Image (cartoon, rainbow, N blue to C red):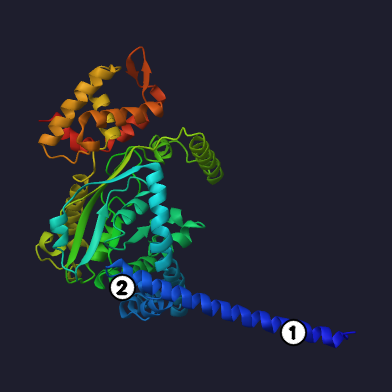
Protein backbone atom coordinates (compact mmCIF):
# COMPACT_ATOMS: atom_id res chain seq x y z
CA UNK A 1 0.00 0.00 0.00
CA UNK A 2 1.29 3.46 -0.99
CA UNK A 3 1.87 5.78 1.91
CA UNK A 4 0.72 9.38 2.12
CA UNK A 5 4.24 10.58 1.31
CA UNK A 6 4.30 8.21 -1.68
CA UNK A 7 1.15 9.82 -3.11
CA UNK A 8 2.74 13.23 -2.76
CA UNK A 9 5.84 12.01 -4.59
CA UNK A 10 3.70 10.53 -7.39
CA UNK A 11 1.77 13.78 -7.71
CA UNK A 12 5.00 15.78 -7.86
CA UNK A 13 6.47 13.40 -10.45
CA UNK A 14 3.28 13.66 -12.54
CA UNK A 15 3.43 17.45 -12.38
CA UNK A 16 7.06 17.42 -13.53
CA UNK A 17 6.16 15.11 -16.44
CA UNK A 18 3.29 17.41 -17.48
CA UNK A 19 5.57 20.46 -17.40
CA UNK A 20 8.20 18.66 -19.48
CA UNK A 21 5.58 17.48 -22.00
CA UNK A 22 4.21 21.01 -22.26
CA UNK A 23 7.67 22.40 -22.97
CA UNK A 24 8.44 19.69 -25.52
CA UNK A 25 5.12 20.23 -27.31
CA UNK A 26 5.55 24.01 -27.33
CA UNK A 27 9.06 23.67 -28.74
CA UNK A 28 7.89 21.21 -31.40
CA UNK A 29 4.96 23.45 -32.35
CA UNK A 30 7.23 26.49 -32.53
CA UNK A 31 9.70 24.59 -34.74
CA UNK A 32 6.87 23.42 -37.04
CA UNK A 33 5.42 26.93 -37.25
CA UNK A 34 8.82 28.40 -38.07
CA UNK A 35 9.50 25.86 -40.85
CA UNK A 36 5.99 26.33 -42.25
CA UNK A 37 6.39 30.11 -42.16
CA UNK A 38 9.73 29.93 -44.00
CA UNK A 39 8.21 27.68 -46.67
CA UNK A 40 5.22 30.03 -47.05
CA UNK A 41 7.54 33.03 -47.29
CA UNK A 42 9.60 31.37 -50.04
CA UNK A 43 6.42 30.54 -51.98
CA UNK A 44 5.04 34.10 -51.90
CA UNK A 45 7.45 35.54 -54.43
CA UNK A 46 7.42 39.10 -53.04
CA UNK A 47 9.02 41.02 -50.19
CA UNK A 48 7.06 41.17 -46.94
CA UNK A 49 6.64 44.43 -45.06
CA UNK A 50 9.70 45.11 -42.86
CA UNK A 51 7.72 46.54 -39.93
CA UNK A 52 5.00 43.89 -39.85
CA UNK A 53 7.48 40.98 -39.81
CA UNK A 54 9.57 42.56 -37.03
CA UNK A 55 8.81 40.96 -33.68
CA UNK A 56 6.36 43.10 -31.75
CA UNK A 57 8.50 43.33 -28.62
CA UNK A 58 11.59 44.38 -30.56
CA UNK A 59 9.67 47.08 -32.44
CA UNK A 60 8.16 48.30 -29.19
CA UNK A 61 11.60 48.61 -27.55
CA UNK A 62 12.93 50.47 -30.60
CA UNK A 63 10.08 52.97 -30.46
CA UNK A 64 10.38 53.42 -26.68
CA UNK A 65 13.98 54.46 -27.30
CA UNK A 66 13.08 56.73 -30.24
CA UNK A 67 14.75 60.14 -29.60
CA UNK A 68 11.86 62.17 -31.04
CA UNK A 69 9.31 60.29 -28.96
CA UNK A 70 11.46 60.78 -25.86
CA UNK A 71 11.52 64.50 -26.57
CA UNK A 72 7.71 64.54 -26.84
CA UNK A 73 7.46 62.72 -23.50
CA UNK A 74 9.72 65.29 -21.84
CA UNK A 75 7.67 68.16 -23.30
CA UNK A 76 4.42 66.55 -22.13
CA UNK A 77 5.86 66.05 -18.64
CA UNK A 78 6.84 69.73 -18.48
CA UNK A 79 3.41 70.98 -19.58
CA UNK A 80 1.19 68.50 -17.73
CA UNK A 81 3.11 68.19 -14.46
CA UNK A 82 3.18 64.39 -14.67
CA UNK A 83 6.45 62.52 -14.22
CA UNK A 84 8.12 60.95 -17.23
CA UNK A 85 7.86 57.42 -15.81
CA UNK A 86 4.04 57.50 -15.78
CA UNK A 87 3.96 59.01 -19.27
CA UNK A 88 6.35 56.30 -20.47
CA UNK A 89 3.93 53.71 -19.05
CA UNK A 90 1.14 55.32 -21.13
CA UNK A 91 3.34 55.18 -24.21
CA UNK A 92 4.01 51.49 -23.57
CA UNK A 93 0.26 50.80 -23.43
CA UNK A 94 -0.34 52.78 -26.62
CA UNK A 95 2.38 50.82 -28.42
CA UNK A 96 0.87 47.52 -27.28
CA UNK A 97 -2.41 48.70 -28.77
CA UNK A 98 -1.01 50.03 -32.06
CA UNK A 99 1.73 47.60 -33.07
CA UNK A 100 0.47 44.61 -35.08
CA UNK A 101 1.37 41.02 -34.35
CA UNK A 102 1.82 39.71 -37.89
CA UNK A 103 1.40 35.98 -38.40
CA UNK A 104 2.50 34.69 -41.79
CA UNK A 105 0.65 31.38 -41.47
CA UNK A 106 -2.62 33.00 -40.36
CA UNK A 107 -2.47 35.48 -43.22
CA UNK A 108 -1.37 33.37 -46.17
CA UNK A 109 -2.30 29.82 -45.25
CA UNK A 110 -5.70 30.30 -43.62
CA UNK A 111 -6.64 33.97 -43.99
CA UNK A 112 -6.34 34.19 -47.76
CA UNK A 113 -8.41 31.03 -48.31
CA UNK A 114 -11.07 32.05 -45.79
CA UNK A 115 -11.33 35.59 -47.20
CA UNK A 116 -11.63 34.23 -50.74
CA UNK A 117 -14.35 31.79 -49.73
CA UNK A 118 -16.36 34.44 -47.85
CA UNK A 119 -16.09 37.04 -50.60
CA UNK A 120 -16.87 34.67 -53.45
CA UNK A 121 -19.78 33.17 -51.55
CA UNK A 122 -21.38 36.60 -51.19
CA UNK A 123 -20.17 38.44 -54.31
CA UNK A 124 -18.84 38.10 -57.81
CA UNK A 125 -15.42 39.61 -57.09
CA UNK A 126 -13.81 41.52 -59.95
CA UNK A 127 -11.00 43.95 -60.75
CA UNK A 128 -12.63 46.49 -63.06
CA UNK A 129 -9.57 48.30 -64.39
CA UNK A 130 -5.98 48.63 -63.32
CA UNK A 131 -3.10 50.84 -64.46
CA UNK A 132 -0.80 47.81 -64.62
CA UNK A 133 1.94 49.38 -66.73
CA UNK A 134 2.30 52.36 -64.38
CA UNK A 135 2.04 50.19 -61.27
CA UNK A 136 4.79 47.89 -62.54
CA UNK A 137 7.09 50.90 -63.00
CA UNK A 138 7.00 51.83 -59.31
CA UNK A 139 10.56 51.42 -57.93
CA UNK A 140 11.05 48.41 -55.66
CA UNK A 141 12.46 50.60 -52.89
CA UNK A 142 9.49 53.00 -52.93
CA UNK A 143 7.10 53.28 -49.99
CA UNK A 144 3.64 52.51 -51.36
CA UNK A 145 0.29 53.55 -49.88
CA UNK A 146 -3.02 52.31 -51.30
CA UNK A 147 -5.57 55.11 -50.79
CA UNK A 148 -9.19 53.95 -50.87
CA UNK A 149 -12.75 55.13 -50.48
CA UNK A 150 -14.44 53.42 -47.52
CA UNK A 151 -17.63 51.73 -48.67
CA UNK A 152 -17.92 48.78 -46.29
CA UNK A 153 -16.05 47.00 -43.53
CA UNK A 154 -15.54 44.28 -46.15
CA UNK A 155 -13.11 46.67 -47.92
CA UNK A 156 -10.24 45.38 -45.78
CA UNK A 157 -10.77 41.80 -46.90
CA UNK A 158 -11.60 42.63 -50.51
CA UNK A 159 -8.51 44.68 -51.36
CA UNK A 160 -6.15 42.48 -49.31
CA UNK A 161 -7.50 39.38 -51.07
CA UNK A 162 -7.13 40.87 -54.55
CA UNK A 163 -3.54 41.96 -53.80
CA UNK A 164 -2.54 38.84 -51.85
CA UNK A 165 -0.36 37.48 -54.66
CA UNK A 166 1.43 40.80 -55.12
CA UNK A 167 1.92 42.48 -51.75
CA UNK A 168 0.90 42.35 -48.09
CA UNK A 169 -0.89 45.46 -46.82
CA UNK A 170 -0.78 46.95 -43.34
CA UNK A 171 -4.13 48.65 -42.72
CA UNK A 172 -5.08 51.41 -40.33
CA UNK A 173 -8.12 49.89 -38.59
CA UNK A 174 -10.66 51.76 -36.48
CA UNK A 175 -11.79 50.98 -32.96
CA UNK A 176 -14.86 49.09 -34.20
CA UNK A 177 -12.64 46.02 -34.77
CA UNK A 178 -11.22 45.99 -31.23
CA UNK A 179 -13.46 43.12 -30.17
CA UNK A 180 -12.76 39.42 -29.96
CA UNK A 181 -11.98 37.69 -32.32
CA UNK A 182 -11.61 40.55 -34.83
CA UNK A 183 -8.82 42.31 -32.91
CA UNK A 184 -6.60 39.23 -32.81
CA UNK A 185 -7.39 38.45 -36.45
CA UNK A 186 -6.58 41.95 -37.76
CA UNK A 187 -3.36 42.10 -35.73
CA UNK A 188 -2.25 38.76 -37.15
CA UNK A 189 -2.83 40.19 -40.65
CA UNK A 190 -0.40 43.04 -39.90
CA UNK A 191 -2.97 45.80 -39.32
CA UNK A 192 -2.59 48.51 -36.69
CA UNK A 193 -5.36 50.16 -34.68
CA UNK A 194 -6.21 53.84 -34.61
CA UNK A 195 -8.30 55.74 -32.05
CA UNK A 196 -9.97 58.24 -34.35
CA UNK A 197 -11.40 60.65 -31.76
CA UNK A 198 -8.84 60.32 -29.00
CA UNK A 199 -7.35 63.71 -28.07
CA UNK A 200 -4.30 62.79 -25.98
CA UNK A 201 -1.35 64.47 -27.80
CA UNK A 202 1.00 61.79 -26.52
CA UNK A 203 -1.10 59.09 -28.20
CA UNK A 204 -0.88 60.94 -31.51
CA UNK A 205 2.88 61.32 -31.06
CA UNK A 206 3.18 57.54 -30.62
CA UNK A 207 0.95 56.86 -33.64
CA UNK A 208 2.91 59.38 -35.71
CA UNK A 209 6.27 57.79 -34.97
CA UNK A 210 4.95 54.28 -35.68
CA UNK A 211 3.45 55.33 -39.02
CA UNK A 212 6.58 57.27 -39.99
CA UNK A 213 8.84 54.35 -39.17
CA UNK A 214 6.64 52.05 -41.24
CA UNK A 215 6.70 54.44 -44.21
CA UNK A 216 10.45 55.10 -43.97
CA UNK A 217 11.17 51.35 -43.98
CA UNK A 218 9.02 50.74 -47.07
CA UNK A 219 5.99 49.10 -45.49
CA UNK A 220 3.07 48.93 -47.93
CA UNK A 221 0.06 50.48 -46.23
CA UNK A 222 -3.64 50.91 -46.89
CA UNK A 223 -5.61 53.93 -45.69
CA UNK A 224 -9.14 55.21 -46.24
CA UNK A 225 -9.02 58.81 -47.41
CA UNK A 226 -12.42 59.54 -45.81
CA UNK A 227 -11.34 58.22 -42.41
CA UNK A 228 -14.59 56.28 -41.95
CA UNK A 229 -17.61 54.76 -43.65
CA UNK A 230 -19.87 57.00 -45.71
CA UNK A 231 -23.33 57.16 -44.15
CA UNK A 232 -25.19 58.58 -47.14
CA UNK A 233 -23.18 56.90 -49.91
CA UNK A 234 -21.39 60.07 -51.04
CA UNK A 235 -17.63 60.47 -50.91
CA UNK A 236 -16.68 62.35 -47.75
CA UNK A 237 -14.08 65.07 -47.28
CA UNK A 238 -10.53 63.72 -46.90
CA UNK A 239 -8.89 63.38 -43.48
CA UNK A 240 -5.41 64.81 -43.02
CA UNK A 241 -3.92 63.05 -39.96
CA UNK A 242 -2.30 59.93 -41.40
CA UNK A 243 -1.39 61.73 -44.63
CA UNK A 244 0.45 64.37 -42.61
CA UNK A 245 2.42 61.70 -40.75
CA UNK A 246 3.33 59.88 -43.96
CA UNK A 247 4.39 62.93 -45.92
CA UNK A 248 6.78 63.89 -43.10
CA UNK A 249 8.30 60.42 -42.75
CA UNK A 250 11.31 61.16 -44.95
CA UNK A 251 10.70 58.29 -47.37
CA UNK A 252 12.96 58.20 -50.41
CA UNK A 253 9.99 57.84 -52.77
CA UNK A 254 6.43 57.90 -51.39
CA UNK A 255 3.84 56.66 -53.90
CA UNK A 256 0.06 56.77 -53.45
CA UNK A 257 -2.14 54.43 -55.49
CA UNK A 258 -5.81 55.52 -55.77
CA UNK A 259 -8.22 52.63 -55.27
CA UNK A 260 -11.95 52.79 -55.98
CA UNK A 261 -14.29 50.25 -54.36
CA UNK A 262 -17.99 49.60 -54.91
CA UNK A 263 -20.53 46.87 -54.25
CA UNK A 264 -23.93 45.98 -55.63
CA UNK A 265 -24.86 45.46 -52.01
CA UNK A 266 -23.14 46.89 -48.95
CA UNK A 267 -23.93 44.56 -46.07
CA UNK A 268 -24.15 47.45 -43.56
CA UNK A 269 -26.26 49.68 -45.81
CA UNK A 270 -29.41 49.75 -43.65
CA UNK A 271 -27.43 50.70 -40.52
CA UNK A 272 -25.48 53.40 -42.38
CA UNK A 273 -28.63 54.89 -43.90
CA UNK A 274 -30.32 54.80 -40.51
CA UNK A 275 -27.47 56.86 -39.03
CA UNK A 276 -27.52 59.31 -41.97
CA UNK A 277 -31.18 60.02 -41.22
CA UNK A 278 -30.28 60.98 -37.66
CA UNK A 279 -31.87 57.96 -36.05
CA UNK A 280 -30.23 56.63 -32.87
CA UNK A 281 -27.66 53.90 -33.26
CA UNK A 282 -28.77 50.43 -32.40
CA UNK A 283 -27.40 49.07 -29.14
CA UNK A 284 -24.64 46.42 -29.34
CA UNK A 285 -27.15 43.78 -28.20
CA UNK A 286 -29.63 44.81 -30.90
CA UNK A 287 -26.87 44.74 -33.52
CA UNK A 288 -25.77 41.26 -32.43
CA UNK A 289 -29.36 40.02 -32.51
CA UNK A 290 -30.04 41.59 -35.91
CA UNK A 291 -26.77 40.31 -37.40
CA UNK A 292 -27.35 36.81 -36.01
CA UNK A 293 -30.84 36.65 -37.50
CA UNK A 294 -29.52 37.93 -40.82
CA UNK A 295 -26.75 35.29 -40.88
CA UNK A 296 -29.21 32.55 -39.94
CA UNK A 297 -31.42 33.70 -42.79
CA UNK A 298 -28.50 33.44 -45.21
CA UNK A 299 -27.65 29.94 -43.95
CA UNK A 300 -31.29 28.88 -44.29
CA UNK A 301 -31.53 30.22 -47.85
CA UNK A 302 -28.27 28.47 -48.67
CA UNK A 303 -29.51 25.18 -47.21
CA UNK A 304 -32.76 25.44 -49.18
CA UNK A 305 -30.88 26.52 -52.34
CA UNK A 306 -32.60 29.90 -52.44
CA UNK A 307 -29.48 31.95 -51.77
CA UNK A 308 -28.56 34.58 -54.35
CA UNK A 309 -25.23 36.34 -54.28
CA UNK A 310 -25.30 40.05 -53.55
CA UNK A 311 -24.12 41.01 -57.02
CA UNK A 312 -20.68 42.37 -57.90
CA UNK A 313 -17.86 43.64 -55.71
CA UNK A 314 -15.52 45.62 -57.95
CA UNK A 315 -12.16 47.30 -57.33
CA UNK A 316 -10.28 49.69 -59.63
CA UNK A 317 -6.58 50.61 -59.29
CA UNK A 318 -5.64 54.01 -60.68
CA UNK A 319 -2.48 55.76 -61.82
CA UNK A 320 0.14 56.06 -59.05
CA UNK A 321 0.78 59.53 -57.62
CA UNK A 322 4.34 60.35 -56.53
CA UNK A 323 4.19 62.62 -53.50
CA UNK A 324 7.39 64.52 -54.27
CA UNK A 325 6.20 65.47 -57.76
CA UNK A 326 2.68 66.32 -56.57
CA UNK A 327 4.07 68.60 -53.84
CA UNK A 328 6.54 70.12 -56.31
CA UNK A 329 9.48 69.22 -54.10
CA UNK A 330 8.14 70.93 -50.96
CA UNK A 331 9.57 69.40 -47.76
CA UNK A 332 6.73 69.35 -45.22
CA UNK A 333 9.15 68.37 -42.44
CA UNK A 334 10.63 71.87 -42.55
CA UNK A 335 7.23 73.58 -42.15
CA UNK A 336 5.09 74.12 -39.08
CA UNK A 337 1.39 73.18 -39.08
CA UNK A 338 0.07 76.53 -40.29
CA UNK A 339 2.56 76.65 -43.15
CA UNK A 340 2.08 73.09 -44.35
CA UNK A 341 -1.71 72.85 -43.86
CA UNK A 342 -2.62 74.49 -47.23
CA UNK A 343 -0.22 72.19 -49.08
CA UNK A 344 -1.55 69.19 -47.20
CA UNK A 345 -5.18 70.10 -47.91
CA UNK A 346 -4.50 70.61 -51.61
CA UNK A 347 -2.69 67.26 -51.82
CA UNK A 348 -5.47 65.46 -49.89
CA UNK A 349 -8.11 66.96 -52.18
CA UNK A 350 -6.22 65.81 -55.26
CA UNK A 351 -5.93 62.31 -53.79
CA UNK A 352 -9.65 62.25 -52.96
CA UNK A 353 -10.50 63.29 -56.52
CA UNK A 354 -8.23 60.57 -57.92
CA UNK A 355 -9.91 57.98 -55.69
CA UNK A 356 -13.36 59.27 -56.70
CA UNK A 357 -12.47 58.90 -60.39
CA UNK A 358 -11.79 55.19 -59.78
CA UNK A 359 -15.03 54.29 -57.94
CA UNK A 360 -16.64 51.57 -60.11
CA UNK A 361 -20.11 52.21 -61.52
CA UNK A 362 -21.58 48.81 -60.67
CA UNK A 363 -24.91 47.53 -62.08
CA UNK A 364 -26.97 48.37 -58.96
CA UNK A 365 -25.44 51.84 -58.67
CA UNK A 366 -26.14 52.53 -62.35
CA UNK A 367 -29.76 51.37 -62.14
CA UNK A 368 -30.33 53.32 -58.90
CA UNK A 369 -28.88 56.54 -60.33
CA UNK A 370 -30.81 56.20 -63.59
CA UNK A 371 -34.09 55.53 -61.78
CA UNK A 372 -33.66 58.63 -59.61
CA UNK A 373 -32.72 60.79 -62.62
CA UNK A 374 -35.90 60.00 -64.56
CA UNK A 375 -38.91 62.31 -64.62
CA UNK A 376 -41.36 59.41 -64.37
CA UNK A 377 -41.65 58.38 -60.67
CA UNK A 378 -42.76 54.85 -61.66
CA UNK A 379 -41.25 53.93 -65.05
CA UNK A 380 -41.82 50.66 -66.81
CA UNK A 381 -39.07 48.09 -67.14
CA UNK A 382 -38.47 48.84 -70.83
CA UNK A 383 -38.47 52.59 -70.21
CA UNK A 384 -35.87 52.24 -67.44
CA UNK A 385 -33.74 49.95 -69.59
CA UNK A 386 -33.74 52.33 -72.57
CA UNK A 387 -32.76 55.25 -70.36
CA UNK A 388 -30.04 53.18 -68.68
CA UNK A 389 -28.56 52.11 -72.02
CA UNK A 390 -28.22 55.79 -72.93
CA UNK A 391 -26.44 56.39 -69.61
CA UNK A 392 -24.09 53.47 -70.27
CA UNK A 393 -23.23 54.73 -73.76
CA UNK A 394 -22.53 58.26 -72.49
CA UNK A 395 -20.46 56.92 -69.56
CA UNK A 396 -18.34 54.78 -71.87
CA UNK A 397 -17.83 57.68 -74.26
CA UNK A 398 -16.44 59.78 -71.38
CA UNK A 399 -14.20 56.96 -70.14
CA UNK A 400 -15.95 56.65 -66.78
CA UNK A 401 -15.16 53.54 -64.67
CA UNK A 402 -18.22 51.61 -65.81
CA UNK A 403 -18.30 47.93 -64.89
CA UNK A 404 -20.25 45.86 -67.42
CA UNK A 405 -20.64 42.14 -66.61
CA UNK A 406 -19.49 40.20 -69.69
CA UNK A 407 -19.20 43.55 -71.48
CA UNK A 408 -22.98 43.70 -71.92
CA UNK A 409 -25.31 46.65 -71.27
CA UNK A 410 -28.28 44.30 -71.07
CA UNK A 411 -26.52 42.01 -68.59
CA UNK A 412 -25.67 44.98 -66.36
CA UNK A 413 -29.30 46.13 -66.44
CA UNK A 414 -30.59 42.63 -65.62
CA UNK A 415 -28.16 42.17 -62.71
CA UNK A 416 -28.79 45.61 -61.20
CA UNK A 417 -32.56 45.42 -61.43
CA UNK A 418 -32.65 41.85 -60.15
CA UNK A 419 -30.76 42.77 -56.96
CA UNK A 420 -33.06 45.74 -56.31
CA UNK A 421 -36.19 43.64 -56.90
CA UNK A 422 -34.95 40.78 -54.69
CA UNK A 423 -34.37 43.26 -51.87
CA UNK A 424 -37.75 44.91 -52.53
CA UNK A 425 -36.07 48.29 -52.90
CA UNK A 426 -38.01 48.48 -56.17
CA UNK A 427 -41.35 46.70 -56.54
CA UNK A 428 -43.00 45.69 -59.82
CA UNK A 429 -46.68 46.72 -59.79
CA UNK A 430 -48.86 46.52 -62.93
CA UNK A 431 -45.81 46.69 -65.16
CA UNK A 432 -44.34 49.71 -63.35
CA UNK A 433 -41.28 49.84 -61.10
CA UNK A 434 -42.40 51.49 -57.88
CA UNK A 435 -40.13 52.80 -55.12
CA UNK A 436 -41.71 52.30 -51.67
CA UNK A 437 -41.21 55.53 -49.66
CA UNK A 438 -39.39 53.80 -46.80
CA UNK A 439 -36.89 52.34 -49.30
CA UNK A 440 -36.07 55.67 -50.97
CA UNK A 441 -33.07 56.48 -48.68
CA UNK A 442 -31.60 53.05 -49.47
CA UNK A 443 -31.90 53.57 -53.24
CA UNK A 444 -30.42 57.05 -52.85
CA UNK A 445 -27.49 55.57 -50.92
CA UNK A 446 -26.44 53.56 -54.00
CA UNK A 447 -27.17 56.41 -56.42
CA UNK A 448 -25.08 58.84 -54.34
CA UNK A 449 -22.05 56.54 -54.55
CA UNK A 450 -21.62 57.30 -58.27
CA UNK A 451 -23.33 60.69 -58.43
CA UNK A 452 -20.01 62.54 -58.68
CA UNK A 453 -19.24 60.53 -61.84
CA UNK A 454 -22.59 60.35 -63.62
CA UNK A 455 -23.35 64.03 -62.99
CA UNK A 456 -20.78 64.66 -65.74
CA UNK A 457 -23.21 63.06 -68.20
CA UNK A 458 -26.10 65.18 -66.99
CA UNK A 459 -24.14 68.43 -67.32
CA UNK A 460 -22.82 67.68 -70.81
In which quadrant of the rendered image does the C terminus lie? top left
Q: Is residue 410 visible?
A: yes
Residue reaching furthest to the right:
1
Cβ atoms at labels 2 and 1 below 8 Å apart: no
Left or right: 286 in relation to 439: right
Residues 337 and 99: in front is: 99
Badge 1 marks a residue whose secondary structure is helix
Residue 131, numbered circle? none
Q: CA distance from mark 2 to mark 1?
A: 46 Å
Quarter of the view holding residue 40: bottom left
Q: Is residue 219 above or below residue 397?
A: below
Residues 455 and 320: in front is: 320
Categorize mark 1 by other alpha carbons within 10 Å: few (<14), some (14-19), many (20+): few
Q: Is residue 381 above or below residue 411?
A: above
| Lower sequence index among marks 2 and 1 | 1
Badge 2 marks a residue whose secondary structure is helix
Residue 248: give x, y in percent of width and height. Answer: 22, 68
- Mark 2 vs mark 1: give the one in front: 1
Q: Is residue 166 above or below residue 458?
A: below
Residue 50, numbered circle? 2
Quarter of the view holding residue 161: bottom left
Residue at (23%, 37%) from the top-left corner?
406
Left or right: 288 in relation to 347: right
Q: Is residue 174 visible?
A: no
Residue 362: give x, y in percent of width and height. Answer: 26, 37
Categorize mark 2 by other alpha carbons within 10 Å: few (<14), some (14-19), many (20+): some
The residue carrying mark 1 is: 12
Residue 195: give x, y in percent of width and height. Answer: 40, 59
Residue 112: give x, y in percent of width and height. Answer: 38, 57
In which quadrant of the rendered image does the N terminus lie? bottom right
Residue at (40%, 56%) from the top-left corner?
113
Left or right: 284 in relation to 176: right
Amino acid sequence: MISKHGWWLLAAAGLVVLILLRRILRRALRRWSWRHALRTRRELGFRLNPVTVTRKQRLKLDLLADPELRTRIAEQAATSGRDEASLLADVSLYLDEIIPNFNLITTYTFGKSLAGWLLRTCYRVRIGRSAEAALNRIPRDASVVYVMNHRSNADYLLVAFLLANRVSISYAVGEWARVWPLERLFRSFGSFFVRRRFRDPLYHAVLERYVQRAVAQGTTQGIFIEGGLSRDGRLQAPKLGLLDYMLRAGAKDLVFIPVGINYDRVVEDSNLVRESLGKPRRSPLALIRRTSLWLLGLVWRGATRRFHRFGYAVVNFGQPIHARAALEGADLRALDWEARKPLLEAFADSLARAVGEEVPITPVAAVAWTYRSMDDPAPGRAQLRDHLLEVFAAAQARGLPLYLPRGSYQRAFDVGLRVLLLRRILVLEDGHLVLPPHKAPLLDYYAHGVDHLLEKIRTH
